[in-house]
Image: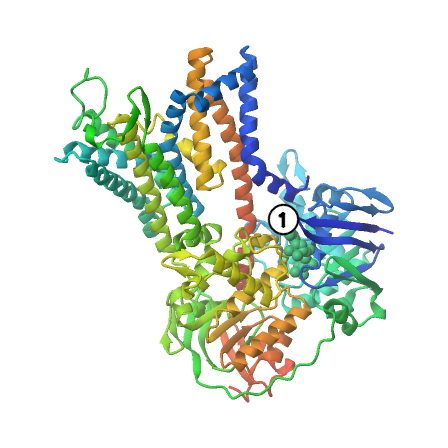
């Protein structure tokens, strides 16, 4: 296997292999604890994908994952590493909840209003680090990442005091429930499955088309692949940077609203941190190589893995951490692929110093 | 026989890059491989160096069959390669780069002193001098190449492959390089040299192999052939002397006045530059590379800002305007470096073809959305017109051969149909047939009363095409010639900083 082939091999086959290796690793762990991995996997996947109840759970869980994954993909493919999806979700979700709780009218169109507010809040939250990068050259990666922690404390403060739900036992840190009129339609009271899942899938498909066909999609892709080429071709890089990050943040806000108005009906303390939706979404979009449709597919797969893991715990008594182990080993192999990508970036940058050196020669 | 590659076949999908190719190399011989863009030269060399696999065929070294799976194997078998894009670490010293992979150690630590000593010894042995302590980022392209050569020599290889080594070098550096190749031969090394410049072949090669369309057309000893025959074999027809018709230039399209730019460390990159380009004119800028030509075109095309001065394009003041405003005003630009500015390697040919075109052509983009069918059609026109050898317009740019990538970029900028075209090194890495074609297209554009600002390290290209020539030295315009006055000697003298009293 040559170096070049290796690289190609890794980019083409890695999602598949990452998953396969992850599953194999999980199987090894199961064998070690004395469980038959084949029957365990069969149970796991037959539950999460072929059992109506669990399938509903899988899809509901996958919605915020795929949306935040696509949000990350939008930014990353343009070369802006947004790691603040979690914070953008927290702020978006909280703001939407506030409107839902305090807006006097309770009607379906208020849901749309709440979504707009949530998306705007998410976008603004993403634009803060963008502006800092633009103005003061602060790294977007670090800034977005650090803002997650700050945001988390900020939003938790709201549910621990100002809008804390006093109806229950008073222990849970959460907001009161939003009005029934604002919620998405549930097919059965026993099952979390609701119409917001379809809305999420539709949005992902629309974004996929938008990124492929639109001027913005083209310009942001070129910016991500070679920023100098984009600049040379007359693409306004600042505009693309702000638009990209705003869109990414808005989509995070949207993801949070889907979770709140479709599944949870309230803002709960640490609801986006403990579930790690955004990190799972990030993983899905990395496996999918920034492709929104594939991000959706992998999000559903990863959600199914988690739901199946829970089901497994109930029926076989295997700890649900099994699915975490599988997920982690998948991440590991995906990150190996990332390493290759970075290496490629470095090689692509090579001509850069050639040009510089011509200037130096002249000194 | 030192190396025999027998019946090598390499396919990329439906495309046969090497079709039953056989070459041989004897010890102490210099073999030149020439051929049109996309003929399969680089592919063949990558196979020999273990960078690329092959579908069938056999490689023998000293009669023994070998199969390399990586350059590491090739180096163990005494084969080294100087790649077209240098693989150096700019922040590190020359010596550190040269010994990389085989570092001398003291205990577990890198022994820098010993590295310096080894490199000095190596330099003496091959008469290739370099300061071991100089940082690679402070080296000219020519010096970087010397470091690459030393790196290969440090690996103690006997066979050295050069893939288009002279494409990025200035004429003086090329002469040095060719001398180095002859010295290496004297030291007993065997060399394979890929180049598009036939005079280099005639200067150093013992044998010449001509490739076309993935096949070897002919192998012959150098002294039995000529530039004419080689170009005939490569292109398939004889190249004719071109008659350049005189045309009267019209109104001014580009006026640069008192342009000044200073680097952050106080070096004058542009020093009071004044130039003017009129419609129907090809204006050349001659100069040793690194004397301000790059900065000048970057300021004109909006990639860099000038400190002071004025640029008027097509009647519009575009001093320090944005790239898109300048393109809008009527300027297209073939950039110096096809990978740094000219293209996105990972993007498809279509995506590379439509850059900026979509801003102006409503059939490509309407209401913010691309029309895929028209994008394909439009891309195919560029690819066909400029004879870019490709398999499909959705393949990625990085799979094009170097020359074909260049042709795509030339085609894209040419088709912008702007009154001013900046052409920086337009024919870098392109075969002689395609050079002839591109020169023809540039002259056609001039005939249509558009203007071209030409920058090239190939002095002959500038002299052949330009109606007027500015000579740059140390960021200044050091003189100006009309077509009739221009000679190599006069221009060369001004390029080195001499003064032309008749002109100034
Ligand atoms: N990885 C690849 N995938 C698909 N096609 C490829 C790939 N690499 C090269 N090719 C094709 O193989 C053919 C031969 O390419 P190669 O780079 O060997 O040409 P070359 O003779 O070196 O040309 P040039 O003079 O332009 O450098 C070209 O048509 C090129 O498009
Ligand atoms: Mg080549």
Q: Position of residue B12 (x, y in %)?
A: 67, 49
> Residue at point 54% right, 60% down?
A355
Would you place residue A310 above or below residue A96 in this image? above
Kindly tell me whether residue B475 is visible in this rendering.
no
Q: Chain of mark 1?
A: B
Q: Position of residue A281 (x, y in %)?
A: 41, 34
In the rendered structure, the answer to whether residue B99 lies left or right of residue B325 reads: right
Residue closest to the eye, A239 or B476: A239
In the rendered structure, the answer to whether residue A187 lies left or right of residue A349 reads: left
Q: Position of residue B445 (x, y in %)?
A: 53, 77
Would you place residue A306 above or below residue B446 in this image? above
Q: Residue furthest left?
A: A104
Q: Position of residue B499 (x, y in %)?
A: 55, 82
- Name the image quarter holding residue B220: bottom right
In the rendered structure, the answer to whether residue A2 lies left or right of residue B356 reads: right
Q: Indicate the secondary structure of the residue bearing disc 1.
A: helix
Q: Which residue is mark 1?
A: B97
- In the picture, the quarter occupied by the N terminus of chain A is top right
Kindly tell me whether residue B115 is visible in this rendering.
yes
Residue closest to the eye, A77 or A16: A16
- Name the image quarter holding residue B454: bottom right
Residue closest to the eye, A282 or B3: A282
Residue closest to the eye, B397 or B273: B397
């Amino acid at each position: 296997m040559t170096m070049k082939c290796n690289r190609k091999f890794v980019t083409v086959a890695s999602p598949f292999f990452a998953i396969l290796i992850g599953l194999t690793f999980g199987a090894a762990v199961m064998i070690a604890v004395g469980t038959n991995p084949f029957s365990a996997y069969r149970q796991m996947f037959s539950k999460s994908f072929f059992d109506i109840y669990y399938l509903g759970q899988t899809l509901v869980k996958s919605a915020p994952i795929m949306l935040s994954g696509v949000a990350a993909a939008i930014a990353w493919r343009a070369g802006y590493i947004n790691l603040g999806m979690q914070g953008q979700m927290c702020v978006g979700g909280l703001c939407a909840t506030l409107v839902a709780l305090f807006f006097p009218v309770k009607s379906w169109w208020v849901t749309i209003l709440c979504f707009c507010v949530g998306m705007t809040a998410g976008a603004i939250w993403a634009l803060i680090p963008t502006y800092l990068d633009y103005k003061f050259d602060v790294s977007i990666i670090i800034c977005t990442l650090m803002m997650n922690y700050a945001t988390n404390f900020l939003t938790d403060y709201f549910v621990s005091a100002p809008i804390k739900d006093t109806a229950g036992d008073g222990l849970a840190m959460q907001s009161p429930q939003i009005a029934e009129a604002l919620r998405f339609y549930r097919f059965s009271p026993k099952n979390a499955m609701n119409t917001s899942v379809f809305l999420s899938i539709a949005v992902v498909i629309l974004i996929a088309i938008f990124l492929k066909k639109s001027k913005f999609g083209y310009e942001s892709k070129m910016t991500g692949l070679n920023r100098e080429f984009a600049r040379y071709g007359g693409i306004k890089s600042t505009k693309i940077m702000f638009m990209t990050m705003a869109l990414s943040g808005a989509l995070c806000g949207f993801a949070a609203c889907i979770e709140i108005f479709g599944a949870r009906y309230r803002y709960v303390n640490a609801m986006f941190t403990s579930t790690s939706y955004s990190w799972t979404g990030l993983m899905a979009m990395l496996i999918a190589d920034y492709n929104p449709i594939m991000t959706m597919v992998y999000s559903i797969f990863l959600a199914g893995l988690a739901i199946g893991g829970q089901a497994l715990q109930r029926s076989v008594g295997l700890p649900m951490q099994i699915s975490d182990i599988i997920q982690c080993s998948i991440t590991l192999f995906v990150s190996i692929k990332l390493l290759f990508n970075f290496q490629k970036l470095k090689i692509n940058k090579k001509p850069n110093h050639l040009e510089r050196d011509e200037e130096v020669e002249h000194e | 026989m030192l190396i025999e590659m027998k019946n090598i076949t390499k396919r990329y999908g439906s495309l046969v890059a090497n079709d039953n190719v056989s070459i041989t190399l004897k010890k102490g011989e210099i073999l030149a491989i020439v051929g049109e863009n996309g003929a399969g030269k680089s592919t063949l060399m990558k196979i020999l160096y273990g960078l690329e696999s092959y579908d069938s065929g056999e490689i023998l070294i000293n009669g023994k069959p070998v199969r390399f799976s990586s350059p590491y194997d090739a180096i163990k078998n005494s084969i080294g390669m100087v790649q077209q894009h240098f693989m150096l670490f700019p922040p590190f010293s020359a010596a550190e780069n040269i010994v990389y992979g085989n570092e001398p150690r003291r205990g577990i630590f890198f022994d820098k002193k010993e590295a310096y000593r080894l490199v000095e010894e190596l330099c003496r042995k091959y008469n290739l001098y370099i300061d071991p302590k100089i940082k690679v980022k402070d080296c000219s392209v020519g010096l970087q190449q010397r470091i690459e050569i030393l790196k290969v020599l440090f690996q103690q290889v006997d066979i050295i492959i050069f893939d288009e080594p002279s494409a990025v070098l200035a004429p003086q550096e090329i002469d040095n390089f060719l001398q180095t190749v002859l010295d290496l031969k004297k030291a007993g090394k065997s060399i394979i040299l890929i180049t598009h410049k036939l005079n280099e072949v005639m200067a150093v090669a013992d044998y010449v192999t001509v490739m076309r369309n993935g096949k070897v057309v002919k192998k012959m000893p150098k002294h039995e052939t000529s530039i004419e025959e080689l170009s005939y074999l490569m292109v398939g027809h004889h190249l004719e002397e071109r008659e350049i018709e005189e045309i009267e230039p019209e109104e001014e399209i580009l006026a640069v006045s008192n342009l000044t730019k200073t680097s952050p460390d106080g070096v004058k990159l542009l020093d009071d530059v004044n130039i003017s380009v009129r419609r129907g004119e090809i204006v050349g800028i001659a100069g040793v590379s690194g004397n301000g030509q790059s900065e000048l075109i970057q300021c004109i095309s909006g990639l860099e800002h000038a400190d002071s001065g004025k640029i008027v394009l097509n009647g519009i003041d575009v001093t320090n305007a944005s790239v898109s405003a300048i393109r809008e005003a009527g300027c297209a630009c073939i950039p110096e470096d096809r990978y740094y500015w000219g293209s996105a390697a990972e993007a498809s040919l279509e995506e590379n073809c439509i850059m900026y075109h979509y801003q102006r052509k409503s059939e490509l983009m309407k209401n913010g959305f691309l029309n895929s069918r028209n994008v394909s059609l439009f891309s195919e026109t560029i690819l066909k017109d400029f004879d870019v050898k490709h398999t499909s317009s959705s393949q990625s740019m990085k799979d094009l051969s170097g020359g074909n990538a260049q042709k795509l970029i030339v085609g894209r900028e040419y088709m912008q149909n702007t009154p001013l075209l900046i052409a920086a090194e337009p024919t870098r890495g392109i075969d002689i047939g395609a050079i002839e074609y591109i020169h023809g297209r540039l002259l056609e554009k001039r005939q249509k009363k558009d203007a071209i600002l030409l920058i090239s390290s190939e002095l002959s290209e500038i002299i052949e095409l330009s109606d007027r020539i500015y000579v740059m030295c140390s960021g200044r315009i050091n003189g100006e010639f009309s077509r009739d006055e221009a000679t190599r000697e006069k221009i060369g003298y001004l390029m080195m900083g001499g003064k032309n009293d008749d002109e100034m």
